[in-house]
Amino acid sequence: MKIKKKNTVYLSLGSNIGDRHQHLMDAIEQIKLLPGCTVEKLSSVYETDPVGFADQTPFLNMVIKIETSLQPEELLNSTQKIEEYGGRTKTIRWGPRTIDLDILLYNNENIKLKHLEVPHPRMFKRGFVLIPLKEIEPNLIFSDGKPIERYIEELSEKEGVRKWRISYGEEGSELSEN
């Protein structure tokens, strides 16, 4: 029996419609149910000002680290099904959404497919992605050799990223207010 390789993946989660926090937690529970997936780390939850389409409520964002045997396209299809299950509709680019899941990093690979680009093409310009990613992987160095800290230093919109709730404790306890 062939054992499938485990891949290290970082996902960004965001929500700004309805019970934003519950949408994030529901998505994490759905990710845990994916075959061959284990959630390894969760960042704190951050409240962030909208980017792109500004006339909407603030987002809650976080980053999670998973180990998975799913291939990139299989994982993309699975995350899109979780978005659909969570009630996401795509009407306005960068508009309001119940849940948004993005594959940020897949191992240390550079992937360019028709519907998937990894590293995520806009992640290096988004504080709501880099700040929670740095929280769970403070010494991360990207395939270009540049450390995450350097990208964060170069951000212009990091002031719009505020810690909303702290991460899970060592015991895996509930998220607590900041």
Image (cartoon, rainbow, N blue to C red):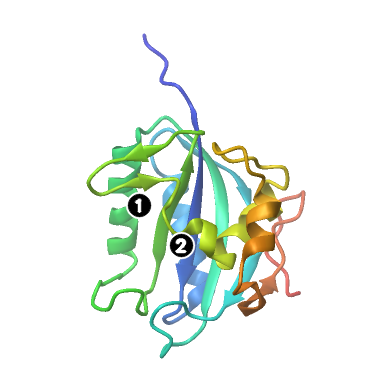
Report helix, strand or loop for mark 2: helix
- 128 left or right of 30 in image: right
Report helix, strand or loop for mark 1: helix
Which residue is found at the position 43% from the left and 51% from the top? 120
Looking at the image, residue 46 lies above or below residue 43: below
Which residue is found at the position 36% from the left and 38% from the top? 111
Q: Which mark is residue 79?
A: 1
Alpha carbon distance from label 2 to label 1: 12 Å
Return the disc, 2 or 1, that comes first in the chain's sequence.
2
Looking at the image, residue 21 lies above or below residue 3: below
Is the C terminus in the top left, top right, bottom left or bottom right quadrant? bottom right
Residue 34 percent location from the top left of the image: 39, 42
Instruction: Return the residue at label 2.
Output: 26
| Residue 146 vs residue 109, the one in the foreground | 146
Pair 2/1: label in front: 1
- 138 left or right of 75 in image: right
Q: Which mark is residue 71?
A: none
Which residue is found at the position 35% from the left and 42% from the top? 75
Q: Are marks 2 and 1 in contact (CB under 8 Å)?
A: no
Q: Amino acid at mark 1?
A: Thr
Q: Amino acid at mark 2?
A: Asp
Residue 77 percent location from the top left of the image: 27, 47
Q: Which residue appears farthest toward the top when viewing the image?
A: 1
| Residue 62 vs residue 161, the one in the foreground | 161
| Residue 93 vs residue 90, the one in the foreground | 93
Q: Residues within 10 Å of mark 1 (few under 14, many from 20)?
A: many
Looking at the image, residue 127 lies above or below residue 162: above
Q: Quadrant of residue 129?
A: bottom right
Which residue is found at the position 66% from the left and 77% from the top? 159
Is the N terminus in the top left, top right, bottom left or bottom right quadrant? top left
